[in-house]
């Protein structure tokens, strides 16, 4: 039976009526300066979010939203990626991730050499005993179990991790200075395989520290070959960032070449004034490797000082066997004499950050485990040595023994000019190399590096707005799409229909870091709204209490 003319007319009218219905979204962000992560020029537009997904972007006309935000005067960008995060413990203590959420960081990437799995029972016991201000039970074994432990507990940002080469070595070889046996190497490779299939991003190393220092290039290549099968990445705190910087970069490039793997340099720097001139040679090597078909990138923090421990001032041999053996040796007068001599003698055999700093007045003590030593927090090694009437080297050894830890330390090492030049490199992204604490509670028991609270905001405020080092669109690209592409992460890193709704809104005229070396526990300012997986975690600069963070899996993930 043919439809009547009236019926046909009614259907046409209904069709046009439905077409004229305004779009409706769960969340509608209107009139913002859209910086989509691609590096292309910004434009004024709208973003519509449904559930956890960006449903539409552009000029959304008469669209409506259950929640509407007028973003006039604000930049709307993808959530930022922290390529080097140590929020592994701070998120256990406080899942809000206050320091980083207030800067728009929606993905924390872990795994600089040490990862939170795979752990054996001996490692779990040692980790439990070495805990400082933050105490927690270790309820996991594998890396993926740790990440799921975080999200099940409730956290605001998303999390991802590399599997740590140091962790793999301790799990099999322990803290000994020797090559793994063929069986141990096979075990390490099997652990990489399991981690990659559970979603690890690749293999991470930190080669200036014992026991990672004992790893050969060939050992790392074998581990990276496994990660390469899953399209993972190798990312490394290289063997040297100072006297042997160029040789260490050669090693990273060799690993990338022979393992057929993408590689990234953790927190690129030229440590020590005598090495500042090496910047151009570093860039030339990376550019040459990329021109030859490799994929070499880097990340950085936007400060002239680094932060680690007093272990980075002592030769690796004295640290063999772990902290207890290290502490025991430092109490032997003959060994102390030898260690002091090596701490003051220039060498290419190991990386001494004390020598790179050049003077104990440029070494700031910020993290003590023992309450009896916390009064020294914020003093320089030179000041403490003068208080005690001992040499800086002897003071450093005494503090490690007395504190029961490596003692958290800031070293002033880099050139401001080189920091600016690095920011502008096309293959540079950013990582805080820090946790994500709050300005309250247990976090105030220790000091920290200002990068903990300010790395992203410092980029957008000081280096983009105030000093015009790079354009805003380029900075956002380096915080979002560039690292997401390097990591092979899907549906994140750009504002695009179908991507997860990790979205930040900030005032480009006011965003700035406030943390200083003297007073680091200060939040950055200017971030107004943050959404993670479509859920608002920051509203008008204040945390909402929501914990929508998820595990972000790497390219080799196999869903069970």
Image: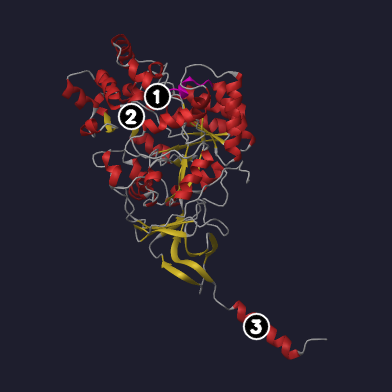
- The residue closer to the viewer here, 306 or 97, is 97
Name the residue rendered at 51%, 53% in the picture: 40
Residue 261 placement, left or right of 209: right
Q: How many marks?
A: 3
- The residue closer to the viewer here, 413 or 418, is 413
- Describe the element under mark 1 as helix, strand or loop: loop
Q: Distance between the residues labelled 2 and 3?
A: 70 Å
Q: In this view, does 7 lie above or below 41?
A: below
Q: Distance between the residues labelled 1 and 3?
A: 72 Å
For the residues bearing labels 1 and 3, Cβ distance under 8 angstroms:
no
Residue highlighted by disc 1: 242
Q: Which residue lies furthest to the top in this view?
A: 334
Q: Quadrant of the image for the C terminus? A: top right
User: Which quadrant would residue 15 be assigned to in this image?
Assistant: bottom right
- The residue closer to the viewer here, 19 or 91, is 91
For the residues bearing labels 2 and 3, Cβ distance under 8 angstroms:
no
Residue 43 x %, y %: 47, 61
Q: Is residue 81 above or below residue 336?
A: below
How busy is the neighbourhood of tag 1: few (under 14 within 10 Å), some, or many (20 plus)?
Answer: many
Name the residue rendered at 53%, 60% in the picture: 54
For the residues bearing labels 2 and 1, Cβ distance under 8 angstroms:
yes
User: Which quadrant would residue 317 be assigned to in this image?
Assistant: top left
Query: Residue 211: within the magenta?
Result: yes
Query: Residue 233: within the magenta?
Result: no
Name the residue rendered at 46%, 29% in the picture: 123
Residue highlighted by disc 2: 413
Mark number displayed over residue 379? none
Residue highlighted by disc 3: 14
- Describe the element under mark 3 as helix, strand or loop: helix
- Describe the element under mark 2 as helix, strand or loop: loop
Residue 469 appears anywhere in the view = no
Q: Which residues, given as a range, are shown in magenta?
A: 209-216
């Amino acid at each position: 039976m043919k439809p009547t003319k009236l019926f046909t007319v009614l259907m046409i009218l209904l069709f046009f009526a439905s077409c004229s219905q305004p779009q409706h979204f769960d969340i509608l962000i209107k009139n913002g300066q859209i910086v989509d992560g691609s590096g292309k020029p910004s434009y004024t537009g709208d973003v519509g979010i449904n559930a956890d997904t960006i449903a539409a972007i552009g000029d959304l006309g008469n669209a409506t939203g259950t929640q509407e935000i007028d973003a006039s005067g604000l930049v709307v960008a993808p959530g930022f990626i922290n390529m080097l995060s140590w929020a592994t413990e701070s998120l256990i203590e406080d899942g809000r991730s206050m320091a980083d959420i207030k800067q728009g960081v929606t993905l924390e990437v872990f795994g600089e050499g040490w990862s939170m799995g795979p752990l054996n029972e001996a490692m779990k016991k040692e980790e439990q005993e070495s805990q400082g201000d933050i105490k927690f039970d270790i309820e996991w074994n594998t890396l993926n179990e740790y990440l799921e432990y975080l999200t099940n507990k409730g956290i605001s940002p998303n999390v991802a991790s590399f599997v740590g080469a140091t962790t793999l070595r301790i799990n099999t070889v322990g803290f000994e200075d020797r090559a793994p046996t063929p069986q141990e190497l096979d075990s390490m490779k099997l652990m990489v395989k399991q981690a990659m299939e559970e979603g690890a991003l690749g293999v991470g190393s930190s080669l200036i520290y014992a026991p990672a220092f004992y790893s050969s290039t060939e050992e790392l290549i074998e581990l990276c070959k496994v990660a390469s099968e899953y399209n993972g990445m190798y990312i490394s705190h290289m063997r040297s960032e100072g006297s042997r910087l160029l040789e260490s970069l050669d090693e990273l490039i060799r690993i990338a070449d022979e393992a057929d793997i993408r590689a990234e340099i953790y927190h690129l720097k030229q440590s020590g004034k005598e090495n500042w001139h090496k910047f151009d040679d570093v860039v030339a090597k990376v550019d040459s490797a990329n021109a030859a078909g490799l994929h070499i990138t880097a990340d950085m923090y936007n400060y002239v000082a680094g932060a680690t421990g007093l272990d980075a001032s002592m030769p690796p041999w004295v640290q063999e066997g772990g902290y207890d053996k290290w502490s025991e040796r430092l109490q032997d007068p003959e060994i102390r004499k030898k260690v002091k001599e090596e701490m003051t003698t220039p060498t290419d055999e190991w990386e001494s950050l004390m020598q790179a700093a050049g003077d104990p007045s440029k070494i700031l003590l910020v993290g003590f485990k023992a309450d009896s030593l916390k009064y020294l927090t914020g003093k320089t090694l030179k000041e403490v040595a003068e208080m005690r009437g001992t040499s800086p080297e002897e003071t450093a050894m005494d503090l490690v023994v007395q504190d029961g830890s490596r003692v958290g330390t800031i070293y002033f090492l880099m050139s401001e000019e080189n920091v600016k030049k690095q920011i502008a490199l096309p293959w540079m992204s950013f990582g805080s190399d820090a946790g994500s604490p709050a300005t309250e509670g247990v976090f105030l028991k220790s000091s920290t590096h200002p990068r903990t609270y300010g790395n992203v905001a410092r980029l957008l405020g000081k280096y983009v707005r105030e000093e015009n080092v790079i354009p805003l669109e380029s900075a956002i690209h380096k915080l979002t799409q560039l690292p997401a592409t390097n990591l092979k992460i899907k549906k994140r890193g750009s504002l695009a229909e179908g991507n997860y709704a990790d979205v930040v809104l900030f005032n480009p005229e006011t965003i700035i870091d406030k943390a200083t070396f003297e007073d680091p526990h200060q939040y950055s300012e200017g971030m107004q709204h943050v959404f993670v997986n479509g859920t608002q975690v920051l509203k008008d600069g204040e945390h909402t209490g929501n914990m929508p963070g998820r595990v972000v899996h790497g390219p080799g993930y196999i869903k069970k």
